[in-house]
Image (cartoon, rainbow, N blue to C red):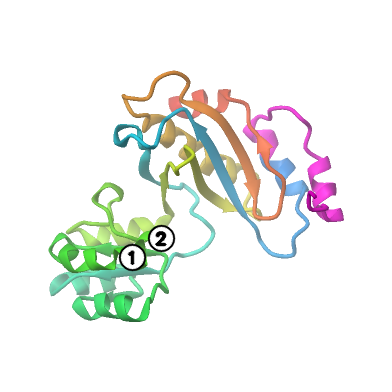
Amino acid sequence: MPKKLSKNTAKARALVEARLYALTDAVPLLQKAKFAKFDETVDLTMRLGVDPKHADQMVRGTVVLPHGLGKTKRVAVITNGDKQREAEAAGAEFVGGEELVEKIQKENWTDFDALIATPDMMKSVGRLGKVLGPRGLMPNPKTGTVTTDVAAAVKEIKAGKVEFRTDKTALVHVPVGKLSFDAQKLVDNAMTVIGSVVKAKPSAAKGRYIKGITLSSTMGPGIKLDQSVADLAAKA
């Protein structure tokens, strides 16, 4: 038996018509539909025409949102020597070497939003796959979190760098800000993400690449976007 919708949810969903919306119309509508008492996160979901079972059709990358995410991410850095001082100076909350690896491994400690490691530490960090993997926190060269330039990596994450990657069902979920943001800032952030995903199209992907785009908030309704937004974002 389907779960009965709350009055607030039903009222919010009723505001959304069964049609595709321009991004500039979808953002104000999502803000109008707000009923939660907290500042909700706005998410962009893209359904892609790829088969994630094939490595050459995986879509993955990072993008720095022009207006950030509305919260400062807590960054941990695993490195040695002078690099530790560089990470601290750049604003990393947690910095260490083997002792930080042990803390994560023995205590299942993941009180951070992003983890950066230098290449010389990856042999030790590799032991943390069971703890970090399920939480999407494992450092990876493709996302710029395995690097010798730890200061730049920390600053990028603090500035609003987000990662995107296809899941098993070929969906990409990316946060693009808070519902309290100015509407234009949410539009800018969303356009930046869409453009980056479009440009990350694998050469092995055949047929229609962007199959659907939906904008939603933590408690709010999903609003389906007009496909033309992908073409506009790719040109921006």
What is the three-letter code of the residue carrying label 2?
Pro
Report x, y in % for residue 212.
57, 30
Element at label 1 = helix
Left or right of 131, for residue 87? left
Element at badge 2? helix
Decide: marks 2, 1 in contact (CB < 8 A)?
yes
Residue 41 placement: quadrant: bottom right
Identify the disc placed on residue 130.
Answer: 1
Question: Within the magenta stretch, is there residue 20?
Answer: yes
Type of the residue with mark 1: Lys
Q: Image point 41% across, 70% down: which residue? A: 112
| Residue ID at (18%, 63%) | 122
> Can residue 185 be seen?
no
**Is disc 2 surrounded by few (<14), some (14 to 19) or many (20+) residues within 10 Å?**
few
Q: Residue sitting at 19 percent across and 70 percent down?
A: 79
- Observer-nearest of 108 and 19: 108
Decide if residue 118 is in sight here. Answer: yes
For the record, the magenta segment spans 1-26
Of residues 2 and 109, which is closer to you in this image?
Answer: 2
Rendered location of residue 205, percent (x, y): 37, 25
Residue at 58%, 48% in the rendered image: 43
Left of 37 or right of it: where is 96?
left
The image position of residue 54, as x and y in percent, is 33, 34
Residue 199 in which image quadrant: top left
Disc 2 to disc 1, how far (Cα)? 7 Å
Q: Residue lying furthest front in this view?
A: 1
At which x and y percent is residue 92? 33, 70
Q: Which residue is mark 2?
A: 134
113 in the magenta segment: no
